[in-house]
Amino acid sequence: MSLIATLGAIEIGLVFALVALGVYITFRVLDFPDLTVDGTLPLGAAVAAAMIAGGVNPVFATLAAIVAGCLAGTVTAWLNIRFAILHLLAGILTMSALFSINLRVMGVPNIPLMNRPTVIDFFTWLNPFIAILGLPARPTLRVLALLIIVTVIAALLARFLKTEFGLAMRATGANPRMARAQGIRTDMYIYVGVALSNGLVALAGALFAQTAGFADVSIGTGTIIAGLAAVILGETIFRSRSIVVAVFSCLIGAIAYRLAIALALNAGWLGLRASDLNLVTAVLVGIALMLPGVANPLRGLFKRSAP
């Protein structure tokens, strides 16, 4: 696989690391299966791209995308809590509505952002270091800028989940009945958690639009699958109960997942094409889901064979 293709896979992996962090909050912390993310990823891209194309500062456009994602997550939580609609159905309803909203925001199905200012431009101070390394300038700059952004957000999220508020949120997902018995207002923590999750996914969409150079209304397809695969793959690689390790394993899992897809598509002996992306994705997700179950019998075998 070429250097450019490797950098491209890492770049997409870093963007989807934010999706994995959002999915981790809902699926692992809150035990709230949320399908809204398939709509909030293009929502973040749509808001950011429409504002940047309109001349708004990319930082403000990115912040607006995060707010839009948080609002979408709040709607899903509201449907679930206020009207007792099943998590999955509430997420599907919001996701379906977001498709039309995204088209309204964009005005057209696709907004190009070529030669527009982006948040990546604020990291051009890294260019001298990239020149010393002799790596391709623009792809490497995007990777390093995303690495800085994602690492800072992952560290903040890990710190947040260790605060008193974060512990109450984790208790809400682990055992809501006991949490309520302890005086924890579980509804509030679900609202905050689902909103935060979708805010992170919308941020991923905003960064995707700015690094890829376009926003398209269809980019959200399969977002939840990619996020889940990254979370499961990360947990398989780093089996730890530490919340810090768990958060950063999402980052590693997302990059490993994208590199595995790129390797499969670039392996000439496999004869795969770009049109086989969904097939490769399904196989990799299946393997990621099977890995934890496969490891346990082997571990038991080794224990039985020990003297």
Image (cartoon, rainbow, N blue to C red):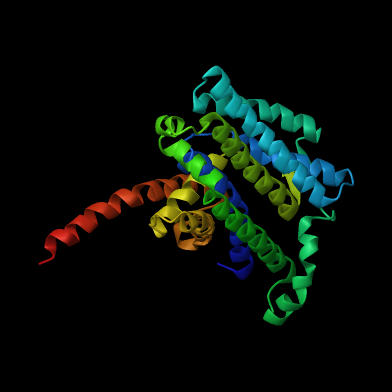
Q: Residue furthest top?
A: 83
Residue 278 x %, y %: 52, 44
Residue 104 in view (yes/no): yes
In the figure, residue 191 lies in which quadrant?
A: top right
Q: Quadrant of the N terminus?
A: bottom right
Q: Is residue 31 above or below residue 87?
A: below
Q: Is residue 136 left or right of residue 227?
A: right
Residue 13 in view (yes/no): no
Residue plotted at (22% across, 52% down): 297
Q: Residue furthest bottom?
A: 132
Judge by depth and name the residue closer to the eye, 143 or 272.
143
Q: Is residue 25 left or right of residue 50?
A: left
Q: Is residue 286 above or below residue 271?
A: above
Judge by depth and name the residue closer to the eye, 157 or 1.
157
Judge by depth and name the residue closer to the eye, 189 or 139.
189
Q: Is residue 289 above or below residue 2?
A: above
